[in-house]
Amino acid sequence: MARLFRRGAGLCALVDGRPVGYVVFQTEGPVREVYLVEVCPDMRRQGLGRRLLEAAETYLLSTGAQCLTVDCTSPEGEALARGSGFTGPESQHGPGVPYTHTPLKKFLTDWRPPARDPWA
Ligand SMILES: CC(C)(COP(=O)(O)OP(=O)(O)OC[C@H]1O[C@@H](n2cnc3c(N)ncnc32)[C@H](O)[C@@H]1OP(=O)(O)O)[C@@H](O)C(=O)NCCC(=O)NCCS
């Protein structure tokens, strides 16, 4: 976990002092990437992943983030992100097609990135 947190800042969920989940994210710029959210296998499906993502969102908004991105690496991560309001292209996986990754994003404010100048 310490290695992961070197990539950015993060939040850790504790239950009775035991670390049971974490979310790691980028700390600067209007667009911040959520690098990873993970919950201990024996603590999953109890709402911790959603609460971690919500807590990250609240913190990042309070520190100037306008938009969050996440590159989902599992179907359950994608379901979590989409259920938390992230949107993006449909993932292409299914029988015989393994899950790879799905880039999703969520705007937190009315801010939008400036349009690119095609002549620049
Ligand atoms: C993804 C992960 C963080 C979810 O954590 P969690 O605490 O189990 O999630 P929650 O209980 O808060 O569930 C929130 C939503 O996520 C989705 N979800 C979670 N686990 C799921 C699963 N196994 N299958 C499908 N959807 C799932 C559901 O939409 C769920 O909402 P619901 O309970 O109303 O159906 C956890 O499964 C995990 O650590 N996976 C391994 C690491 C990983 O893949 N991280 C994501 C990388 S983008």
Image (cartoon, rainbow, N blue to C red):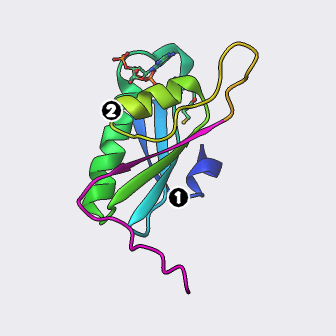
Residue 113 belongs to magenta span: yes
Magenta span dominant secondary structure: loop
In the rendered image, the residue lying farthest to the front is 119
The residue drawn where x is 42% and y is 73% is 115
* Residue 49, x across and y down, in percent: 41, 29
Element class at badge 2? helix
Position of 71 compared to 96: left or right? left
Mark 2 is surrounded, within 10 Å at the Cα level, by few (under 14), some (14 to 19) or many (20 or more) other residues, namely few
Residue 47 belongs to magenta span: no
**Mark 2 is on which residue type?**
Arg
Q: Which residue is mark 2?
A: 51
* Residue 14, x across and y down, in percent: 40, 32
Q: The C terminus lies in which quarter of the figure?
A: bottom right
**Mark 1 is on which residue type?**
Gly
The residue drawn where x is 48% and y is 75% is 116
Q: Which residue is mark 1?
A: 8
Q: The N terminus lies in which quarter of the figure?
A: top right
- Report if the beta carbon of the residue with label 1 is closer than 8 angstroms to ligand 1: no
The residue drawn where x is 41% and y is 53% is 68
Whether residue 15 is visible: no
Q: CA distance from mark 1 to mark 2?
A: 19 Å
Q: Which residues are magenta?
A: 101-120
Position of 64 compared to 8: left or right? left
Choose top left, top right, bottom left or bottom right for residue 80: top left
The residue drawn where x is 24% and y is 58% is 109
